[in-house]
Amino acid sequence: MATLTNTLIDFHHSYKRTTKIALDWLSTQTCSVGNWESKGTFGSTREIIDCVKRLPDRYEVPIFVITALREAIEARRRVHQMYKELHASASDAFAQDSDDAHEAFIARLEETLYILQSNSKYNPAISQKASENNQNCNRFASLGSRTANYENAMEVEDTASTAKIDENRPAKTETVVPDDRLALEDDDLGEWIELSYFIYSLDAILDQTKKYWTEGANGILPICLAAWLSSAAFHEVGRRYKKCDYDTLLSEWTRHRMKRIEIRFNDIPGLQSETRRFTDLKGLSFHRSLLQHYRTLQENARVVPEAGRYEDFSKIIAPFSKDNKESAFHDHLAIYLMLEHIRQLLASKRAIAAIETPGAPQAVCEPLLPFIDQVFSDKELPIYVQLVFGMEMLLASYKGYTWPDGVLNRQNCRILVLQFALEVQKSFSETIRCIQRRRESASAFNLSDLQSVLDGLEGYTRENRFDLYSQAPWTAGCHIVEILSVAMFEGLHLCCDTGYLCALLHLYNALRKIDSNFRQIKLLDQLCEIFLDKLFLGVFPTENFSSHFRRAMGGPLNWEANVKRSNQMELSKPIPGISMRKTGSTRLSEFYDLHIFGYEPSADFWHFTFEAKPRWQPTTRREQNEALKRAYSSPLTVSLEKVKENVVQEFNGPLPVARINYLAVFVFSANSMEELCKSFSAIEEQKVQPDRDLGFTVVDSLLVQIVDHQRDNKLRLLLPYWKPVNNAKLFFNGLDGKQSLEQFLWKSAI
């Protein structure tokens, strides 16, 4: 048993990158002089030499090309020497051929370097930007460009790969190159390293997510966050290892394991695992065999009506065990039953679909369903690695949550999600009643959307589904994530776009700034911090309060002449209850953003993951590139753990933005504004209509007059004694100063 250190991996990646830099430049230059018919595609090393010889004498060669060739040759020599020290060739004739091919390719690179140095002149001034292209590309992006064939060796490509050594072998016409850039086939050594890295990555990710579910069972992590992290890992595996054909992967992994030398990555953080489910050949083939067997059985062609019946998961889901025979029996039964339930779901109407967003990037909140639907609909379709990985994650999450630390946890996750759905349903009902009491207010426009969600939740809570798949922690957790996201969307829309919360917080902030002795209210201080970007545009105003309020509400400039302010431009009065500035619900929570965008992290997402800064602040292109490089230059487990550290603060931190019931916050702000309006009813000069604008006009008028007092030296002295200001202070003093966000957090399941 041999150990492959981090040094070998570094050299391997280095020689692939530098080789590509040189060959990319060579291909481009040869095409530009019109001497290359293959448009930059090298099929053999002989073609590389021919390409170099076609260059005109004294052709300008950038220094970075010469440097890249030198580095590639040196790195390849070191890798090859390490490989030979493993004595792989002693027991494998094919590996001996690979040794010879590797040495031959090094010789070709040396010959290429010699010709370029002999017949060319250097031009160090030529930019090295070309060498920096594609640094963050997915090394496994083209694993899926091969069809399944047990008899042919799987050719693992990436954007920095090298060429097989067969001088007379024609180029393969089936090669698919990401982004239309030059990519050559890898040698056997490179394929072995990449495959090992690939397999160990899957095992490490599986172990990582299993740990999250164990923490969920022990109350350390919310179940919805464990499901969210699992879904994020599942989709990221799909992107990093694009639809790799599982049959071919299994074939090639088997062939390489016959060398009886295992490559381990003990020196690379994030690649260690305990279960080694995919590293083991039996575990690697387990789900693929089950999926293929299940979809080809004739008796499974029909849907069983009673597939949603109750099943006791504690008697079916077995703990992680070293007894492979006993564990395999329970695992086989569990997967078979869940596949049966999934097929029944695909053929019938899912209640959760009523609140899912049809046009979303991931319209189905359960990640496995679309993939299983594909392979069941087309039995000839190859089974992809992502699907097999997802099935193993489904099973592992069940085991991790049901048997944390080997002790049975009888908590039924289906009941958890139903309890949460009932809590959210109740909050939607209260919000609708709040709006219906004020039908003349602008918030009444939201009634139809709110009612639609409420109806969907009612149908969901009535659905009698306690089969093994529906009780699965990952399934139930995904439903909680979907319900929570819908509640966040509707609640944030009401809070930001109706303007009532905006008016309440702006008035509170103004009173705080003009009177240092004004009593602080913890809840309002917390809400001001949470909505700093969306309702204050990133800064708490200390003066000119009315303009800041009107800008936050999207008020346009008022070009009408004003006698008192003829030399100033003034913002128009906002419409009561309607924000002309659509703030949206994104860039407040990483949890929410990643879910609604289909678990496809953007460069901004990665930047905010690694850098401690507010999510609403803009990022530069350089920051985005650095974030992408950092995210994809390390194993997924490392990045996923960093994501978890950040997002857990959205649930358990001082400002748990992902746990807040924004519907309840809206109801609080609407009721508070109505009370504010009533408190001003005793002032004769204020003509307000409480049912229509809920005191919105009062706030706008009051902020304008506060600014007028601040700008006039005499009036500024009277501001502390001005009756409308003191009346507003009395209103806020009447609120519960000890009230905090704790009273506005979801209580069930999360």
Image (tube, rainbow, N blue to C red):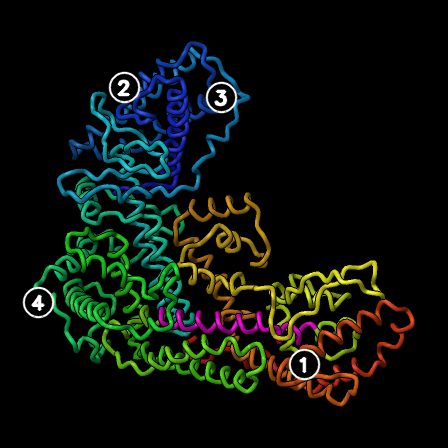
Q: Which mark is residue 299?
A: 4
Task: Specify the segment rendered in magenta.
Answer: 478-506
Q: Residue furthest front?
A: 560
| Residue where numbered disc 3 is placed | 63
Q: Secondary structure at mark 1?
A: loop
Q: Main secondary structure of the magenta part?
A: helix
Query: Which mark's residue is nearer the viewer, 2 or 4?
Result: 4
Which three-letter amino acid code belongs to the residue tagged 4? Glu
Q: Classify 659 as above or below 252.
A: below
Q: Which mark is residue 438?
A: none
- Contact between marks 3 and 4 (CB within 8 A): the answer is no
Q: Looking at the image, tell me whether mark 3 or mark 4 is earlier in sequence order.
A: 3
Q: Secondary structure at mark 2?
A: helix
Which three-letter amino acid code belongs to the residue tagged 1? Gly
CA distance for labels 2 and 4: 56 Å
CA distance for labels 1 and 4: 66 Å
| Residue where numbered disc 2 is placed | 46
Residue at image position (37%, 38%) is: 179
| Residue where numbered disc 1 is placed | 695
Residue 535 place in picture, x, y as percent: 63, 67
Q: Is residue 32 left or right of residue 560?
A: left
Q: Looking at the image, tell me whether mark 2 or mark 3 is earlier in sequence order.
A: 2
Q: Is residue 399 left or right of residue 495?
A: left
